[in-house]
Image (cartoon, rainbow, N blue to C red):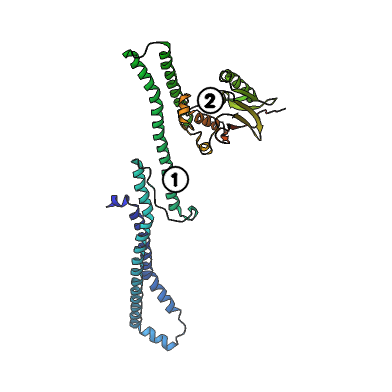
Amino acid sequence: MINYIRRRLRWKLFLSYLAVVLVGAFVLIAAIEFAIPRAFGRHLATVGTFGRDDHMMMESSGYMMDNLFVNFRTAVTEATLIALTAASVIAVGLSALISRRVIAPVRDMMHASRQIAQGNYGRRVTLPANRPITDLDEMGQLAYSFNQMAAQLEESDTMRRQLIGDVTHELTTPLTVIKGSMEGLIDGILQPDQETFQQVYHETARLQRLVTDLQELSRVEAGAYELYLKPVDLGALVKQVSGRLRRQFEDKGVQLNVHVPPGLLMAEVDLDRISQVLINLIGNALQYTPSGGQVDVGVRRKNNGLLFTIADTGAGIAAEHLPYLFTRFYRVDKSRARAGGGSGIGLTITRHLVEAHGGQIWVESAGIGQGSQFMFLLPVTPGTPLERS
C-alpha cells in the first residue's frame, strides 16, 4: 500500500490535504479538553455582578456548578463535532477534486511522453481553448512547453527522414551509373575506351564530393570543429579567392567583377572557413549564371561589420523558394542541380560557418530570370583595426 501511494502523486496530494484536516481537528479537540475548562473557571471568577447572597448561594451549590459546566462542555463538544464532521466531509471532497484536477494534466503529459518515446511525435497535450499563454497557470504553461518540445521533435524526425531519403537518392544515382558501366564492360556491351572510363571517373568523383560534403555538414551542424580566429584583411581575401576562380569564369564566358574599396578591411575570422564560404557562394553564382552573364563580388563596411555581396545575372529565384534556400538538400531546380553535380548542401554548410562567426546570411532575388544576390554580414571584433580610406 505504501509503495502504491509513493507512485501516485494524486494520493500524495490527497493525504497532504487530509493531514492538514487532521491536524486542525487535533488542535480543536485539544482546545476543548484543556482550554475551555480554564477559560470557563476564569470568567466565573471575574464575575462581579452578583450580590453577596448570590455568591453564597453559588458557593453552596457546587453540584449545580459542576452540572452546569458538564452541560456546557457537552454542548460545545457536540457543536464542534458536528462542525468538524461537516468540515471534514467538505475538505475530503475538495481535496479529491483538487487532486484530480492537478493530476489530470500531469497524467496526460505522462501518457504523451510515453507515446513520443515510442515514436509517435504527433502526440500533443490538451490545452484550454481560446486562452492566451499568459493566462495559463504553471501547469498550463508546462503543457504548452511540452507541446512545443513535441513539435520540435516531430520536425527533427521529419528532417531526419527527409535527409535519409535525399542521401539515399543522391548515392543511388552515381552508384547506378557506375554499376551499369561496369556491367556493360564485363558483358562486352561497352568498349573499354576513354569515354567509358571518363564517365565512371566522373560519377566516382561526384560520389566522393557528396560523401565529403556530408562529412563536412555533419561537423558544422554538430559544432565539431574549432575556429582559428586571427585578424584578416577581408578585402584582400575577396581578391585572392576571386583570382583563384577567375579561370573557371573565363572558361564559361562569364564576367567576374570584384569591388573592394581601398584601405584595410580587417576582422578576426577563421581564414580557411571564410575562404570556404566565399568559394561556395561565388561558385554557386557561376553555376547558375549562363555564358555572357556577369557576377559582381564585393565587400564594404556597414555599421559595425563587413558586408559581403555576391550578385549574379543568372537564373534568379522565385520568392517562394527564398526562405528554404539554406536548408540542406533543398533545390530550386532539382534536375539542373543534379546535372551540374551539386550536392544540395553547400549553402547549408555556408550558413553554419557564417553563423559560427556571429554573422548572418541571406539571399535576395527579383524573381525568375532576374538574377540573385547573396549577402552575409560579419561583425568586427572591438579593438580590431578597421580602416577604410
Q: CA distance from mark 2 to mark 1?
A: 39 Å
* Type of amino acid at the residue the image marks with label 1: Gln
Discs 2/1, front: 2
Disc 2 crowd rating (10 Å Cα; few below 14, some 14-19, many 20+) is some
| Residue occupying image coordinates x 34% and y 63% | 93
* Nearer to the camera, 61 or 118: 118
The quadrant holding residue 262 is top right
Q: Nearer the viewer, residue 160 or 99?
A: 160
Q: Nearer the viewer, residue 21 or 286?
A: 286
Residue drawn at 33 percent across, 16 percent down = 183
Residue 372 position within the rendered picture, expressed as x and y whole percent measured from the top left:
57, 32
Label 1, residues with CA under 10 Å away: few <14, some 14-19, many ≥20? few
Q: Is residue 145 visible?
A: yes
Direction from residue 169 to residue 221 in the image, left or right: right
- How many numbered discs? 2
**What residue would you read off at disc 2?**
287
